[in-house]
Image (cartoon, helix red, strand yellow):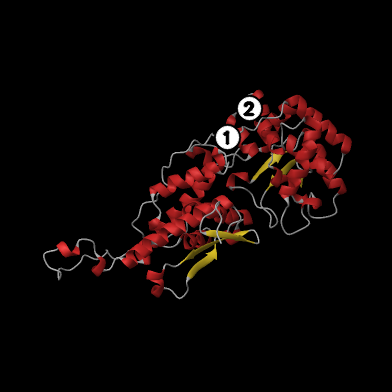
Amino acid sequence: MQTTSAPFSFRKDGVWYFSRRVPKDVRDHYRVSRITYSLRTRSASQARARALAAAAKLDQHWHFLRMGAEDLPGRHLMVSAEVEVPTKPASPSPTELGPTVREAGELYLRLKGAENRPKTFAAAAWRSLGYLVDACGSKRLAEYTRQDATKFRDALIARGLNGASVSRVLGTVRAIFNLAISETGQQIPNPFRQLYLDGKSGVRKRAPVPVEEIRRLQKACLATDDEARWLVALVTDTGMRLAEVAGLAVEDLVLDAPVPHVVVRPHPWRRLKNGNSEREVPLVGSSLWAARRILASSDTVYAFPRYNKTDKTTANSASAALNKWLKEVIGSDYSMHCLRHSLRDRLRAVECPSDIVDQIGGWHTQGIGQAYGTGYPLPILKKWLDRICA
């Protein structure tokens, strides 16, 4: 019961299974006459690759079972039939081969504190390891070779992933291997180190939104004047990440200070991307209008209740809905994240110093000295933001 598209396999309820009869001359080594198990895929191409790999391993194993001393080719030509026949070297123990790839993943997530991170952190790690197992099989760390690494890279490219996505997956797998090798004391190389990849392949650069389109967008926000449009307006003149805005608390909007501003800080329902993300950004132009509208209408702790109906801010649903609206207003070439890129260009246009730009946007500034001090005061930041809203 096999198919020509995937030898040694069959499909049941859409899932592919491996199936191969055990030869009679090695049947004594098995409890069954046929080896059958799930290949755990619905893809015919993946089933074919996995089935052929399994069949090759069985052929090799059966060859060793058949190769006893009595069947050794050329035995009759030996000086003495009593000469000891060299045996196959003992295979390395599991301890010498290191943890399995799954054990490495579990160790990585435990030591990295996955329970205190967004669910996407663990999901990305398991997805990356899943790609590796699909391409090269499930092995112990020492069993993966450089050939496996290049095969894995090529398999990711064959999936249609662009250079940035391939680089991200390889980086995750490399980090998991590095940590597992270090923590378990294995004296083995990481086959994924210094693997060549054209990271720019297939990457589409995000286009900043032109100033005239931003003005049109802000006018549309004023005209519609609802919760979703307040969020867009806040992003346009602060350059905040969409998730940062969607997860704001009402108390984060400080309007009774000498310089009205928004405090970007972590909350139980919304974490920040990194340490540089925690900051204060002056409210000017459309962002100040939006903050006033939020405070005038809010009756919950959340600035945007519609995106905080569960214990986690639903930034992805906000992104999908708002990107759809942006296409209607300024065209399909732009997304909400493009507005963040645009703020940087708008500040460049008024010759704003780059370290001030980084502080406003929560970007990392290179240089040891940049870590000292508390940064620029709000009046200085406001001066530059006022210039792009003039």
Compared with 122, 192 (above or below) is above
Q: Percent from the top left, x then y, of residue 236? A: 74, 35
Which one is nearer the viewer's eye here, 363 or 326? 326
**For residue 67, what is the image quadrant?**
bottom left
- Can residue 117 be seen here? The reply is yes
**Left or right of 342 in this view: 40:** left
Q: Few, some or many C-alpha atoms within 10 Å of disc 1 (few <14, some 14-19, many ≥20)? A: some
**For residue 385, what is the image quadrant?**
top right
Tell me, for residue 263, which label it has, or none. Answer: none
Which one is nearer the viewer's eye here, 85 or 286? 85
Q: Percent from the top left, x then y, of residue 174? A: 46, 50
Residue at horizontal 38 percent and vertical 66 percent from the top: 94
Secondary structure beneath dot 1 equals loop
Q: Percent from the top left, x then y, of residue 208? A: 68, 30
- Can residue 258 be seen here? The reply is no
Which one is nearer the viewer's eye here, 348 or 175? 175
Distance of label 1 from label 2 (alpha carbons):
32 Å
Residue at mark 1: 202
Q: Amino acid at mark 1?
A: Gly
Residue at horizontal 37 percent and vertical 64 percent from the top: 62
Q: Amino acid at mark 2?
A: Cys
Tell me, for residue 352, which label it has, or none. Answer: 2
**Left or right of 53 in this view: 3:** right
**Quadrant where the N terminus lies?**
bottom right
Which one is nearer the viewer's eye here, 252 or 193? 193
Secondary structure beneath dot 2 equals loop
Compared with 377, 116 (above or below) is below
* First in residue order: circle 1 vs circle 2: 1
